[in-house]
Amino acid sequence: MTDLPPPSPESRPAGFGGMPHVEPVLPVREAAPSRALVRVQAQDAQFQRRIRGRLALASIGFGVLFLAVAAKLTDAMILSPATSRIAQAPRLPSAEPAVSRAAITDRNGEILAVTVRGTALYARPGEIDHPSQVADQLVRILPHLDRARLVQRLSPPRQFAYIDRFITPRQQQQINDLGILGLYFETAERRTYPRGRDAAHVLGAVDVDGEGIAGVEKWYDERLRVSPTPLRLSIDIRIQRELREALDWAIDRFSAIGGSAILMDVNTAEVLGMVSLPDFAASDLATASAESRFNRAVTGAYEPGSTFKLFTAASALEAGVVQINGGFDATRPIRIGRFEINDFHGKHRWLSLPEIIAYSSNLASAHMAMAVGGGRHREFLMRMGMGGRLGIELPEAASTLVPSVRRWRDINTMTIGFGQGISVTPLHIITGVSALANGGTLRQPTVLAVPPGQEREGVRVISERTSEQIRRLMRVAVTDGSARSSDSPGYFMGGKTGTAQKVGDRGQYLENRRISSFIGAFPMNAPRYAMHILVDEPKPRADTGGYATAGVVAAPTARRVVERVGPILGLVPETERIAQIQQTIALPLQSARPRAATTTTTPTVAPPRSPTPVPAPAMLPRTPPSMDPQAPPLRRTDAGDGIAMPRLVLHLPAPMPPETGRASR
């Protein structure tokens, strides 16, 4: 086959027109370059025209689409707007992050302690050029800062230093406006106490890191950190305030150095109010003095004085060594070596049990304690919770100072029988008396609120009969004894006063330095609440006849308290049925004059009667004036001019080691 050249572009295809076609053989020659270039440019121009047409078409389409969307939006938003369904949906506030410590409230839900969020200011001294100038600027905004200390904290070689743990938003803005390099802010928390000084000793406080260091804040530190649920206390802030005002009145009136007051529910042992003065603001614990931080209600251990005679009477009644109409001899002093126990303005005769409590006889109380016996007397006091620390939720609660079994002798039995030679806290006294008044069940005190209707567990310490007899004796002490100025018509207060000399660091009694106290319960026909008032080192006054004993110091304070808190507690004074109710709880002092009794520690169950009953002679002791000018004269044996009560100073061959620490307070 002969090789033929390729056909020309202008040649017709083979077979065109139905006939075979033979391309003529032509000589090969090169195409002209100019003609090919013109042909390529024409093709490019045509292609560009097509592209421009497509772009124009697309632009017109998108323009129409955007115009349609704009028209729709104009109609929906301007011409005929419709209410947004999103706007109609409720907007929930953004949840604030939980704080690191739960709140504390009183029994009614009033906030006593709460953690709030704020801003902390700190510095990186390495980034600060002029510490002195920066300190001057900061002190003008934060005037509570010490400039010299601030300069030291802002200076190298420190790498980090807190300037203020909590600043206000305004202070933050002012500091931020300074534009100082090296000062920074961070989110912080601060524990605040809206009630200030109210219940400060109960609440306690936290340190700069938010950890509890005192009071409930320390006892329940882990609970407050773990659970966000508020901690509900048994304290009623209204009662707390009334207690504080009444106690402050007594301290100011008698120029005392301090005092304490407790109000307790006798059936649940809930502490409704606890005050110790002087006190402090819970938010300023670090700057409070040691005297202000000291909680006299649970930490201070004092000789209880004549208030302890209620426990001696209860132990004797429970042991069966005396009946309610029995009594003991108080004719002559009890001599022990060179020393003696005596009564101040004593009756020098046999005294019935109601008279022993009403006249506060030390002699008869010592005989009564000896009749019970040293072993049984000590065991009874231990059963009443006087042997150690109580289970209240306060880390500051102290134990008692009680002679050991080995050192407990007859002299201890006699002196402790009338409240000397033993040191207990006010909380011990009110807890024990609550058991004496509530029917005989001892419950551990608590500062946590007990749910309504819930009965707390307790231990029976005396019979209901003994409890009923003690309630009558407490009422006799108010109607016929040294506690008359505590009586408030219609509330039927029952109680006992006590005046004890303070003990020094070496165990010696201090002249003219006394503790005046009152323990009581109300209403005695159906006891619901117990109260303890203590005034530390009251000074005599001219309008009290030169006395500063419990009958003129603590007892009137108790009356002020009950008249103020009674309505808060829902108690209405039974003024229309005073005679009727008093008859159900009254107890005669003595039905007949007994013959003179000899000095003995053996109880006389009933006083011997003469053939013809003769009324008891009128009592003519020296009586200091009452706080109430309308009240009858007070009769007391634990009051004296310049001396709180008759005392027995022992210097035995084998003396006990001196009591120090809390006893001296």
Image (tube, grey):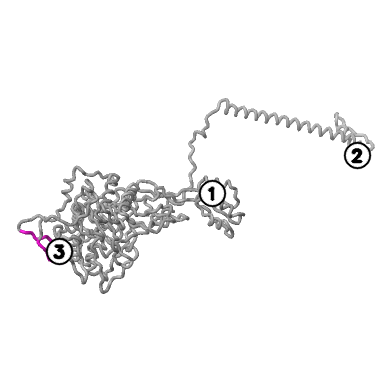
Mark 3, other Cα within 10 Å: few <14 / some 14–19 / many ≥20: many
Foreground mark, 3 or 2, reads 3
Is 117 situated left or right of 459 in this image? Answer: right
Give the CA distance from mark 1 to mark 2.
Answer: 106 Å
Q: Which residue is mark 3?
A: 331
Mark 2, other Cα within 10 Å: few <14 / some 14–19 / many ≥20: few
Give the CA distance from mark 3 to mark 2.
Answer: 165 Å
- Tell me where residue 80 sits by quadrant: top right
Amino acid carrying mark 3 in the image: Thr
Q: Residue at x 70, y 29 (%)?
A: 60
Q: Earlier in the sequence, mark 3 or mark 1?
A: 1
Of the numbered discs in the image, which one, if any, rests on residue 588? Answer: none
Q: How many marks?
A: 3
Amino acid carrying mark 2 in the image: Pro
Residue 219, placed above or below residue 26? below
The answer to which of 621 and 103 lies nearer the viewer is 621
Mark 1, other Cα within 10 Å: few <14 / some 14–19 / many ≥20: few
Of the numbered discs in the image, which one, if any, rests on residue 140? Answer: 1
Is 407 situated left or right of 609 in this image? Answer: right
Residue 580, placed above or below residue 498? above
Q: Residue at x 68, y 29 (%)?
A: 61
The image shows residue 110 at horizontal and vertical percentages of 38, 46
Give the CA distance from mark 3 to mark 1.
Answer: 77 Å
Residue 484 appears in the rendering: yes
* Image: magenta residue range: 595-610
Q: Earlier in the sequence, mark 3 or mark 2?
A: 2
The answer to which of 229 and 586 lies nearer the viewer is 586
